[in-house]
Image (cartoon, rainbow, N blue to C red):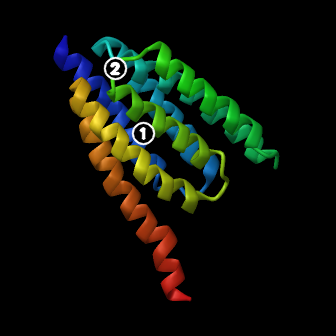
Amino acid sequence: MEIVIQLIGVLGILASCAAFQCKKHRHILNLRTLSEFIFAVQYLLLGAYTGMAADLIGCLRNQIFTRQIAAGKKTNGSIAIFSLAFTVFGILTWEGPKSILVIIAKVLSTVAYGNKNPTVVRTIILITSSCWLVYNIYVFSLAGIACEAVTLISLIAGIIRMDLLPKLKK
């Protein structure tokens, strides 16, 4: 069963890596939603309930932000509500100090995903991905560790390819 649990995360890795290679905010968030849902299932099976709760709330957040940004609406209210939700659920599912990593990661990613600028999204997610990397080490999610390592590489590649190189060509 342990192997199956770890293999579930491989699907999350694929969705996560693809997300940060997208140019459009909507595509980034749709793939992040898929990745977060897959990892929520894995965290449930690992007994990592803070990660599970945070990723399930993250799925809802991503879809709401996708709709708000597509409609040209401000996300400030949603950022505040989801940041509060992540903090409350982090406390309710408290697993010790490692839960703080999840809360920080989700609050920061809420700020990132509430911003329609993909450059800002990629930059802030560098920090959140680092928090998740440490959390995954604590809960022994091998796929989560691999995902965050690959996501960090993908983020750096995306930042170089879509954010830095175009500026250098100007």
Answer above or below: position of 35 versus 93.
below
Q: Nearer the viewer, residue 48 or 59?
A: 48
Which mark lies nearer to you, 2 or 1? 2
Horizontal side of 131 relative to 2 (left or right) equals right
Vertical position of residue 148 compared to residue 160: above or below: above
Q: Position of residue 116 (x, y in %)?
A: 67, 54
In the image, farthest residue toward the bottom: 170
Which label was assigned to residue 3? none
Image location of residue 92, percent across then percent down = 49, 13
Task: Check disc 2 and report the residue beneath it.
Answer: 42
Give the image location of residue 22, x and y in percent: 52, 54
Task: Mark yes or no: residue 7 visible.
Answer: yes
Secondary structure state at the residue bearing disc 1? helix
Q: Nearer the viewer, residue 167 or 87?
A: 87
Q: Position of residue 138 (x, y in %)?
A: 23, 28
Give the residue pinned by disc 1: 15
The type of residue carrying mark 2 is: Gln
Give the quadrant of the N terminus: top left
Q: Amino acid at mark 1?
A: Ala
